[in-house]
Amino acid sequence: MDLDFFIVASIILIIAAFVHGSIGFGFALIPTPIIAIFTDIQTAILLTLIPTLIVNLVSFLSEGNILEGFKKHMPLALLTMLGSAIGTQLLIMSNSEVFKLLLAFTILIYLFINKVNISISIFRIYPKSSFIVYSVLTGVIGGLTNVMGPLLMMYGIELKYTKAELIQAMNISFLFGKIIQIVVFFINGSFTSEHLSFSFLAIFIISFALYFGIKLKKRIDTKVYLKVIRVVLFIISLVLIAQVIV
């Protein structure tokens, strides 16, 4: 691996770990599009996959009530894992740019609905069927783009999750999604020794940034946290659109 690329990628991962630690999500979201500028989307995902898995595990555990969190969010995690397996296999076989654009517009539509106080009533009218379809779809998009946090946030906000519940729901879903992605990539022979070497080294590189981010998160008020989420969602949508257009 080129030294300049290693340094740039390491700095990006450190920033991403701090952001994820402070707001509970965003680790894969930040480095994936930036690293993809220097390589391709699949390589970007492969390089960040194992560090992302570790970050999600730590974030989930940091919220406490571990057994309760597993029981509450396990159905969501299993369904998104199924979707992630499908999405990852599609990523290996095809281009995912169209799905990024679709995700960006989905986020913008949601932010508009939320701004004018229109709720997504389908989650309450058809709670079981909408939960199953939405969870699998979220996993598919996550497998294709390495980004499913916004969709999980939209669902969590609509169901009035607390900050801790939202963080745990997202991170256990990410965790299961990353596990199945690793399995699918290994089955397809996508990993190289270079990918694995960088990934395991990155775990040590991001450790302190993640720790300090989590310390900061515990001081953020829930109302402020939700406002930050909506701002970040808007920025995410613009970044995704720019990636496709530019």
Image (spheres, grey):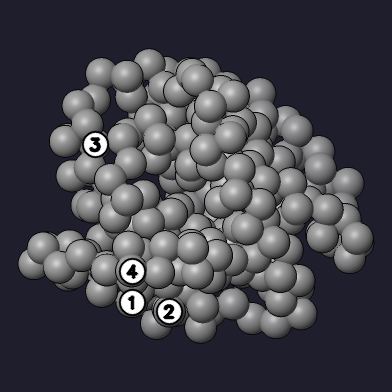
Residue 125 numbered mark, or none: 4
How busy is the neighbourhood of tag 3: few (under 14 within 10 Å), some, or many (20 plus)? some
How busy is the neighbourhood of tag 2: few (under 14 within 10 Å), some, or many (20 plus)? some
Residue 125 image-quadrant placement: bottom left
Residue in front for this viewpoint, 124 or 19: 124
Eye-nearest disc, 1 or 4:
4
| Mark 1, residue position | 105
Residue 42 image-quadrant placement: bottom right
Residue 225 numbered mark, or none: 3
N-term-proximal mark, 2 vs 4: 2
Q: CA distance from mark 1 to mark 4?
A: 24 Å
Eye-nearest disc, 2 or 4:
4
How busy is the neighbourhood of tag 4: few (under 14 within 10 Å), some, or many (20 plus)? few
Residue 178: image x %, image y %?
68, 49
Mark 2 is on which residue type?
A: Leu
Mark 4 is on which residue type?
A: Ile
Q: Is residue 236 above or below residue 21?
A: below
Res 95 seen here: yes
N-term-proximal mark, 3 vs 4: 4
**Residue at the image position 43 percent from the left and 29 percent from the top:** 21
Residue 19 numbered mark, or none: none
Q: CA distance from mark 1 to mark 2?
A: 5 Å
- CB contact under 8 Å: marks 1 and 2: yes
Mark 3 is on which residue type?
A: Tyr
Residue in front for this viewpoint, 175 or 12: 175
Mark 1 is on which residue type?
A: Phe
Residue in front for this viewpoint, 74 or 185: 74
| Mark 2, residue position | 102
Residue 213: image x %, image y %?
40, 24
